[in-house]
Amino acid sequence: MPPASPPKTYRVKSFGCQMNVYDGERMAELLDAQGISPAADGEQADLVVLNTCHIREKASEKVYSDIGRIGKDWSRKDGSAPLIAVAGCVAQAEGEEIMARAPAVSMVVGPQAYHRLPGMIADAVDGRRSVDTDMPAQTKFAALPARRKVAPGAFLTVQEGCDKFCTYCVVPYTRGAEISRPFSDLTDEARRLVDAGAREITLLGQNVNAWRDADGRGLEMLIEVLAAMPELARIRYTTSHPNDMTDGLIAAHRDIDKLMPFLHLPVQAGNDRVLKAMNRSHTADSYLRVLDKVRAARPDIALSGDFIVGFPGETDAEFEDTIKLVDRVGYAQCFSFKYSPRPGTPAAAMDNQIAAAVMDKRLQRLQAAINAGQLAFNTASVGKRCEVLVERRGKLEGQWLGKSPWLQSVHFAGDAAIGDLVEVELIEAGGNSLSGRLIGKTPRPDHPGQGALAVQQNQ
Ligand code: 5AD
Ligand code: SF4
């Protein structure tokens, strides 16, 4: 690789989950601190960071096609190619393979090592390619610059990694063992987010409800402390595991107003034999009992889930149990996926892999059931008044887009600004969004303005 000039501009492109979005933001802040600026819209960047996702096949294949495109289409005006860094979970899982397969890539950096990007960039400028997929517990966060640029709805990673080892999932291998960030680091970071203009904080973790402080106190304690910050209006958390849904956390949904009435609680399947083969360590019934408790604590809670169709050996009758569960719960929204064998996971080596055509059919049926439930949930919201956090402008002149407490997308017209909390009457429901009528603004404590984000997300 020939020497390059030090990059002046960058672009971070994040794929996959919200934890990647968070990491993408932190990498952007790290590059800012090095004096590298975000490339303007439509402008070629000197450094491109692909922050990748490995959860399903499509997600990781995309990386190689993107690298090819950057090499060909994204060369700069002087004809030189940008420096390319591959970060995220594909980097962790396939580091050496990427280096061998994609000579245009000069840096491969795993999710626990991206604080070392500045040194790797210096090497790349000198023509040296490098791979860093170490998994040191904790050191990353301490080495990152303080938070400065945030959207009104900000993310805060509180927990990383997973010890659950569901048999289909790569996360325990790419993100490592469960670790909880220390309580005081999180309250510090939350303070900075709020000072930078965040009105809502979503606490993130692969198993966020497994978070514990040094004394063994759970996520409800952290939520309670954050809720005491006057400028912070809303708190959410995602993603949770059913087995870590403690009574204390469920009670927080009853007791803490700022904790939004929304719970993303993946179940994956509705049949107990399949759940066992997935090593989920809960049954359909024990999952439903958790939801009953949550609903008793917060009757208006909006529920969300993740589903996998076509896990190895899943029969038609077993798949029907998933449809029954969806119909019974009445989810407000869900994510559903075709099973994708991930190299190195136990399920990838199981017999009875399901044919693609069967998975396609099941996914269609499941999505029809999910969409029907989502429309029913949204339709039942019509006539309610609620607060909406304004996140961005809509497509039409004078239109705004934001989120209801139940995480529905709401659009409305009128006098508002990004970061406002406004009261809206929900007047019409669609499957994916609602329209609202602006009633008025909720006054807010003064806060400094917020900076623009230079991070793109691509699902
Ligand atoms: N195939 C399909 N979906 C998967 N998920 C995780 N691993 C796989 C896989 N191998 C889904 C699960 C999880 C979500 C983040 O991605 O539903 O909850
Ligand atoms: Fe993957 Fe299961 Fe851990 Fe979720 S709980 S990250 S699906 S291993």
Image: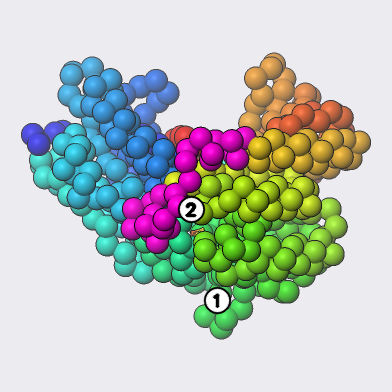
Q: In the rendered structure, which segment of residues is drawn in magenta?
A: 341-364
Disc 1 target residue: 213
Q: Name the secondary structure under disc 1.
A: loop
Q: Nearer the viewer, residue 52 or 114?
A: 52
Among the two numbered marks 1 and 2 on one chain, the one whose residue lies closer to the N terminus: 1
Q: Residue at x 10, y 40 (%)?
A: 127
Percent coordinates x, y for residue 384 in the rendering:
89, 40
Crowding near pointer 1: few (<14 within 10 Å), some, many (20+)?
some
Percent coordinates x, y for residue 186 in the rendering:
53, 65
Q: Nearer the viewer, residue 310 or 174?
A: 310
Disc 2 target residue: 312
The relative height of residue 266 versus residue 379 in the rendered view (above or below) is below
Q: Name the secondary structure under disc 2.
A: loop
* Residue 56 among those drawn in magenta: no
Q: Quadrant of the N terminus?
A: top left
Distance between the alpha carbons at the discs numbered 1 and 2: 38 Å
Q: Which mark is residue 368?
A: none
Q: Residue at x 84, y 64 (%)?
A: 296
Name which residue type carries label 2: Pro
The relative height of residue 156 versus residue 162 in the rendered view (above or below) is above
Q: Residue at x 23, y 17 (%)?
A: 77
Name which residue type carries label 1: Asp
Crowding near pointer 2: few (<14 within 10 Å), some, many (20+)?
many
Q: Mark yes or no: residue 201 visible.
A: no
Residue lying at the far bottom of the rendered structure: 215
* Residue 357 among those drawn in magenta: yes
Instruction: Answer with the quarter of the image where residue 379 lies.
Output: top right
Q: Residue at x 51, y 35 (%)?
A: 357
Percent coordinates x, y for residue 4 in the rendering:
14, 33
